[in-house]
Image (cartoon, helix red, strand yellow):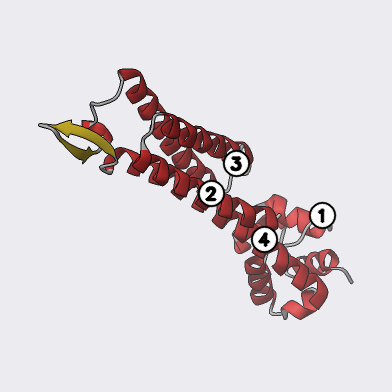
Amino acid sequence: MEFSEKLQELRKNRGLTQEELAEILYVSRTAVSKWESGRGYPNIDSLKEISKFFEVSIDDLLSGEKLIDIAEKENKSNMRNMCDLLFGIVDLFSVLLIILPLYPNTIDGFVYSVNLLNYTETSSRNLIVYWVMFLSLFIVGVIKIILTKTKAEKGNKALMEVSIALNIFIVFFLALTREAYAVVIAFLLLVVKGGTLLKYSKSR
């Protein structure tokens, strides 16, 4: 007997509707309907709840092979979520390009390192571009974290591409304007993203 048939039988034996079972398991009625129609399987946590509620072992509900398959898919999903979250956090670190003393200012013949707030020895155009780039990357990071936390997959990949493209542009622009210290930080952020992207692609 398939899992879908077993679940349906267990639910009916308890005299429960799909909606009532969904409330007990803290999932949507659509999820229960999907499981019972054979269009999907619950995750490990839901399987544990089903096993506990109906007082049957997980082995009775699913074959070992299918259980391994579910566990692998869940691990890949968790890895993707972790990579998405890390991507957002790395983008938040773009604030370092604003607050760290990475920019040279000459005062009384001496060169001092100052942060972007106090940087005056560059053109106003460059300053505007710096602020727009760094704040844009920070905002992308905030949005990325929100999407990851709410488990909204739509737009996540596009946002990742925007993040990388923006980071590459920042590295090139900082190199072009000869901001040596700032370009090192921006490049390190890009390297971390590259490593994260590699792990992300392996989890798909």
Report helix, strand or loop for mark 2: helix
Observer-nearest residue: 130 or 38? 130
Q: CA distance from mark 4 to mark 3?
A: 16 Å
Identify the amino acid type marked 4: Lys
Identify the amino acid type marked 3: Asn
Residue at image position (13%, 32%) is 107
Residue that carries the numbered disc 2 in the rendered image: 193
Q: Position of residue 74 (x, y in %)?
A: 67, 63
Observer-nearest residue: 22 or 83? 83
Asked if marks 2 and 4 touch (Cβ < 8 Å), the reply is no
Q: CA distance from mark 1 to mark 3?
A: 25 Å
Residue 65 is drawn in which quadrant? bottom right
Viewed as shown, does residue 153 lie left or right of 99? right
Foreground label between 2 and 3? 2
Identify the amino acid type marked 1: Arg
Q: CA distance from mark 2 to mark 1?
A: 35 Å
Q: Position of residue 71 (x, y in %)?
A: 70, 69
Residue 183 is drawn in which quadrant? top left
Label 3 CA crowd tier, 10 Å (few <14, some 14–19, many 20+): some
Which disc, if any, is residue 39? 1
Label 1 CA crowd tier, 10 Å (few <14, some 14–19, many 20+): few
Residue at image position (35%, 18%) is 125
Q: Position of residue 158 (x, y in %)?
A: 62, 36
Label 2 CA crowd tier, 10 Å (few <14, some 14–19, many 20+): many
Asked if marks 2 and 3 touch (Cβ < 8 Å), the reply is no
Which disc, if any, is residue 76? 4
Q: CA distance from mark 4 to mark 1?
A: 19 Å
Report helix, strand or loop for mark 1: loop
Residue at image position (36%, 35%) is 179
Viewed as shown, does residue 194 lie left or right of 97? right
First in residue order: circle 2 vs circle 3? 3
Residue that carries the numbered disc 3 in the rendered image: 156
